[in-house]
Amino acid sequence: MEPVQISLGELDIRMGVEVVSESVERVEVRMPVERNRQSLGALHGGAMACLGEMAGSWAALKYASTLGKACVGVDINATHHRGTRSGYVRAVATPIKLGRTLTSHEVVITSEATGDRLCTVRITNAIVEPLGDLTEALDQARAAAIVDQV
């Protein structure tokens, strides 16, 4: 089967996430620092963890969909290496292991301005049977996201 196309969810849209490229081997997204800062003015660590989960879960779903399956997250960890206060960050998710029942991905988040590594996320997803028609569910989510943006 062909992999599904990424559909931004409500939180993705609120955080300003943009899909740069997507394939089973690599998912790349970007996000503005603005609107995602903590009270001291730096990019919120939770926003980086969330971005890592988005990228890693999308990568897992792209793989799972080639098997006619869906996925659910079962474990995530994030190591914060340094902060940033402005510009955009970029997250690249690549597989560590693509199995029949589990996937693990590494997500490296960098500053677009400097190329510095800001955060490393490791995420594991379980491969599961989809609840209903996966393509239809993603189409509905895509339509709802478009309506929310207007």
Image: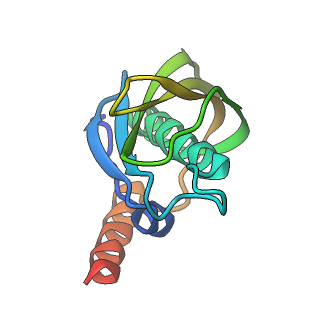
Give above or below for 118 relative to 89.
above
Instruction: Decide which of 4, 38 is in the foreground and name it.
Output: 38
* Outermost residue, front side: 40
- Tell me which residue sits at (66%, 43%) in the image: 73
Colour style of the rendered protein structure: rainbow
The quarter of the rendered structure image containing the C terminus is bottom left
Residue 15 picture location, percent across and down: 45, 62
The quadrant where residue 113 appears:
top left
Residue 118 picture location, percent across and down: 55, 30
Instruction: Decide which of 12, 58 is in the foreground and name it.
Output: 12
Give above or below for 97 relative to 13.
above
Residue 148 picture location, percent across and down: 35, 81
* Outermost residue, top side: 96
Instruction: Decide which of 3, 33 is in the foreground and name it.
Output: 33
- Tell me which residue sits at (37%, 26%) in the image: 114
Residue 49 picture location, percent across and down: 62, 43
Residue 21 falls left or right of residue 59: left
- Tell me which residue sits at (63%, 59%) in the image: 38
The quarter of the rendered structure image containing the N terminus is top left
Instruction: Decide which of 47, 60 is in the foreground and name it.
Output: 47
- Tell me which residue sits at (42%, 33%) in the image: 111
Q: Total number of numbered labels?
A: 0
Give above or below for 46 relative to 101.
below
